[in-house]
Every structure is written in C-alpha cells, then in structure tokens.
Amino acid sequence: MTEAGMVAKIGVNSAGVAVSLNLLRSLADGQNVGMPVHILLRLMLEAPGYTAACELVTLAPAAGSSCITVAGAQGEVVSFEVTPGQCRRDQRRRWCAGPYESLYRRVDPRRESPPDPLSTSVERYARARALLEAQRGNIGVVTLQEILRDRVGAPRCISRRPDMRLHPVDRGESVCGIVIEVERGLMHVAPGVPSDTAFEAVQL
C-alpha cells in the first residue's frame, strides 16, 4: 500500500516480512537531511527476512519521526520509533493495532525529540490499548478492523477525519486501515478513513 506517487511501502513480502507505519510528530522533524521513511520502508519490504529488515532501521538518520512495525512469519514482532538523531526499539507489545504512543518521555532528556502539540498519539494509543485489553483472548481480524474504525474522542480519535478547524497543512487524517495476516500473505485494506471505508481482502 502507498499513497499516489510514492513507492509501495506497507505490506508483506514473499519472505514473510510485514512492514507497517504510523507517523509521529516531533519538533525535530525536518531540521536536517535524513532518510525518508518511505524509502526505508520499501527497502525493508525487499529484505530477505525479518532480521535483515530490522537491521535496515539504522542504515541512515531519519528525516522525520515515525513508528515502524516489523513482523515475521514465525511470530516475531517489533516496533521501532525513529526520530531525527535516535531510534528506540520496543518489543513489549505483541499487538500493534491503531496509533503508537511515543517513547520520547523515556529517552535521555538531553537527546529527546519533544512532541508536536498537534500530536494525538497518546490518547489514540490509550484508546486502542483499552479496546485490545477488553477483547483479550478473542482478538481476530474483525476485532482489529473495528478498532481501526473507532471514532471515540473525535477528532483526536483512532479513525481520523480531517479537522477542518485546523490549517490545511496541519489536518492529519487516517489515510487507510490495514490488518495483515503475515503467515497467509493476506492484507485487509480499507483504502481511506477506515470508519468511512470497507475493508477489502488482498492476497499477495
């Protein structure tokens, strides 16, 4: 999956490597030249295995902030939070649904990238985590799709429509919703704001 005009960057490859992305915002973004996340994700999708994909994260400094989640066919999963000048690895969460809460609060304050005031990561992550905990032991594709459609707390919610009160440059939105069944090479894609768009199964 990708937006028009960009290299395909979110998906699963024939080696059983799945890659996904949640954008983060920090005041350090765009201050220096760095690796565009779209290129990094594409390189990871072309990796021959899970370990090789993970090793690419530190190939070059990042230009902006992102959470990159990598999964393997044997059940491996890790999230990397990359910001300009640093990278954090988080293997504590086995489920990666919805937005990602920045780890910046746990980074050395002398090196941290402060969050952008418009960031909605904290509340969206808390909502996704609560929904996952409520369904513990009964989480499947449909459950994950419903979480990605959640509108509680709008406009600072999981499934985000553009907030027309903000300047056009600052109007964040959910461009799609994706659930990946890595071992089956199957993606379930909502090509638009998930609460407004049906999920379609795409066999790779």
Image: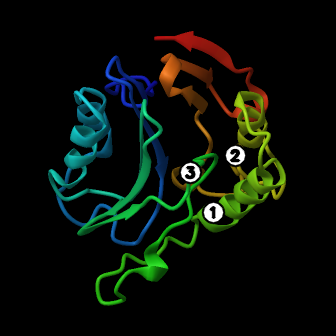
The disc placed on residue 189 is none
Q: Earlier in the sequence, mark 1 or mark 2?
A: 1
**Residue at image location 55% in from the left, 21% down from the top:** 187
Pointers 1 and 2 in contact (CB under 8 A)? yes
- Work out how far the residue at label 3 is from the one at label 2, CA to CA, in angstroms: 24 Å
Helix, strand or loop status at disc 2: loop
- Using the image, tell me which numbered label, if any, was put on residue 120: 1
Looking at the picture, which amino acid does disc 1 mark?
Answer: Thr
Circle 2: residue type:
Arg
Point 48% across, 81% down: residue: 105
Label 3, label 1: how far apart the Cα atoms are = 22 Å
The vertical placement of 120 against 27, above or below, is above
Q: Which residue has dot 3 on it?
A: 94
Label annotation for residue 160: 2
Determine whether label 3 and label 2 are within 8 Å by CB: no
Above or below, 194 against 164 in this view is above
Tell me what residue is drawn at x 59 percent, y 50 percent. Answer: 172
Q: Decide: few, some or many residues near mark 1? Use Cα within 10 Å; few <14, some 14-19, many ≥20.
A: many
**Marks 1 and 2, how far apart in space?**
10 Å
Circle 2 packing at 10 Å, graded few (<14), some (14-19), many (20+), is: many
Please name the amino acid that badge 3 sits on.
Arg
- Determine whether 24 is above or below 144 in the image: below
In front of the other: label 3 or label 2? 3
